[in-house]
Image: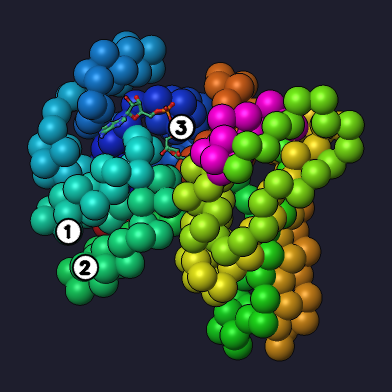
Amino acid sequence: MATMRVGLVGCGNIASDICLAIRNGNMPAEVVALADIDASHAELLRREYQLNAFIGTLDELADAVDYIVECAVATVVPAVVAAAVKHHVDCLVMSVGGLLERPELFDLARDNSVNLWVPSGAICGIDGIRAAMQAGLDEVTLTTSKPPKGLKDAPYLIEQGIDLDGLTEPRVVFEGTAREAVRAFPANVNVAASLSLAGLGPDRTRVRIVADPSATVNTHEIRAKGPFGELTAILRNRPSPRNPKSSYMASLSACVEVASAARLFAARTG
Ligand SMILES: NC(=O)c1ccc[n+]([C@@H]2O[C@H](COP(=O)([O-])OP(=O)(O)OC[C@H]3O[C@@H](n4cnc5c(N)ncnc54)[C@H](O)[C@@H]3O)[C@@H](O)[C@H]2O)c1
């Protein structure tokens, strides 16, 4: 069975979970190239998982692999897509917020027969939203509830002078479009972006952010209505075992995408 050569752009928490899944799982994939703005992160990953991988530039990485995983930062997404297109390699984009303001990247990939994959990330129900969108959607709302300390440094709260100290009951601190939400609450960016891309887009997807003093985990609830009926999907995210600031589900969604791509690659190449 052919083994899919994987290149990881960004060697942090999600990259680490992918390496673990490839090592433990039954998937025909191998990490052969690493790129990171901080080479010490790539070195650490290579050592920790004893990878037979080189550390190089984006261009060198794209030239050497069958599949790229971007798991770095939103600002690097355009350069990763350009490298994927140049070397004709499919790409999984974890920093989905990087695609929200750059819809032309999808056109660029499509025109060059490169697949850009967007994971479900730290929410669930995206499959239903995508399917429902075939008949159009009337409304889609994301409600994110977090413990107040998880919202503490959000630019919107600072700008509006909203103080969450001493909160005793849930408080809606923001309501607006997904486009407004990703600017106001950058930590929520990927979830709002994934939902927007699957459904009504950033200007018609509504987002509500709730500070809940009784919450112990981050909860994302999607509600949608359309000709298909009604959908409610709720995910209560536990933190990743290796990084308390990141949702475990985000890493798991990356791992399942890599596994699917590897099986597809093996089936295609024999
Ligand atoms: N889709 C989702 O639901 C979802 C959920 C969680 C995280 N994410 C996104 O996935 C990405 C990775 O998350 P993580 O938890 O692994 O982050 P992390 O901070 O643990 O790791 C990121 C790594 O990328 C490197 N990096 C930063 N800028 C870079 C650049 N310009 N070029 C190359 N490498 C660079 C960092 O040095 C670091 O090693 C982030 O953008 C995060 O927002 C998406």
Reading the image, the residue beneath label 2 is: 108
- Mark 3: is the Cβ under 8 angstroms from ligand 1? yes
Dot 2 or dot 3, earlier in sequence: 3
Question: Could you say where residue 98 lies in the image, as x and y percent from the top left?
Answer: 36, 51
Q: Relative to residue 24, is residue 146 depicted above or below? A: below
For the residues marked 1 and 3, what is the alpha-carbon distance in whole angstroms? 23 Å
The structure residue drawn at horizontal position 60% and vertical position 88%, both measured from the top left corner, is 135
Foreground: 256 or 170? 170
Residue 252 visible? The answer is: no
Q: Which residue is mark 1?
A: 85
Quadrant location of residue 269? Answer: bottom left
Secondary structure of the residue carrying numbered label 1: helix
Q: Which residue shows up at 68% across the image and 26% down it? A: 149
Asked where in the image residue 15 lies, by quadrant, the reply is: top left
Identify the residue at the far front of this view.
161
The span shown in magenta is 147-159
| Amino acid at dot 2 | Leu
- In the picture, the disc for residue 14 is 3
